[in-house]
Image (cartoon, rainbow, N blue to C red):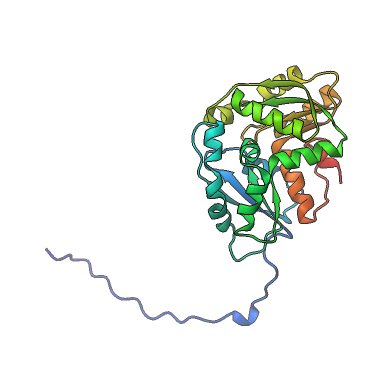
Amino acid sequence: MPSDTTISKPDAVEIHSVRSEMVTDAGPGRWRIGLIVLSNDYTVERDFMNMRPSDDVAIFTTRIENTPDCTVATLRQMAPRITAATELLVPEGRLDAVAYACTSGSVVIGYDTIRDRIRAARPDVACITPITASLAALDRFGAQRLAVLTPYVDDVNAQIARYLQAAGKEVVGFSSFQIEDNEEMAALTSDAIYRAALIADRPEADALFISCTAIRAVEVIERIEERLNKPVVTANQAMFWHCLRAAGCDLEVPGYGALMRSG
């Protein structure tokens, strides 16, 4: 049955050009960071945005498929997907650094492989991983003897310990929440991390290293440092610090530990 409602065609709309007023610049972000985040990560983007020293730091994010469980076998599965994820980061735009945001994945896959897969899409970009950034941060403090806190199960913990030792670090204490499920890692409270950090520390340690980009350790760095009176390096903090420096930004960021206040 035909409708009683008649829809009339609109009159032609005259479009006025304002192109003569157009002014362009280099686009958003004096310093531009590309971020490859795991598909089931809740933490990294939030931490990076919260730690930005100014709006001149622009963060561009893509996701990489990941499984619900964090094991050595599942971490290896991400390697072939890194280039495709990188290709989605503002493909025609400038980036100063690209970070692959998985500490355990960086250890299991290896920095050289990650760098090569990122540079297959971005040939000249600075490539950052949480573990190499954390080592650079620890070296900045001259920290050789480490207390370590992770959320991982033991097959992943063993990989982390071996990597640190191969880099010349002495692990004087290693503590873990023994979590395999990535959702449980994300649900771990910052207060729980704070309490565990105090237990994980050792008097002889030069610094405390808190591994894993998925946990909310950034929120309590200042509290832990004040209590322990020594540097605390966390994966997301170190990764962001390294990205800023690689991009040419040397601004200090208060509230996130001694590392972010250093040049």
Q: Position of residue 75 (x, y in %)?
A: 56, 37
Q: Is residue 209 left or right of residue 85?
A: right
**Observer-nearest of 92 and 58:** 92
Q: In this view, does 77 lie to the left or right of 9?
A: right
Query: Does residue 127 lie above or below 108 as drawn?
Result: below
In the rendered image, the residue lying farthest to the left is 1
Q: How many numbered marks appear? A: 0
Q: Residue at x 80, y 56 (%)?
A: 248
Question: Where 149 falls versus 96 (above or below)?
Answer: above
Which residue is found at the position 65% from the left and 32% from the top? 216
Which one is in front, 215 or 101? 101
Q: Is residue 60 at least partly visible in the picture?
A: no
Looking at the picture, how far across and down is residue 68, in whole percent?
A: 49, 33
Asked if residue 102 can be seen in this view, the reply is yes
- Please name whichever residue, 64 or 196, is drawn nearer the observer in this view of the structure: 64
| Residue drawn at (81%, 33%) of the image | 168
Q: Position of residue 226 (x, y in %)?
A: 83, 26
Q: Quadrant of the N terminus?
A: bottom left
The image quadrant that residue 50 belongs to is top right
Is 214 or 7 nearer to us in this picture? 214
Q: Position of residue 178 (x, y in %)?
A: 60, 21
Q: In this view, does 173 lie above or below 231?
A: above
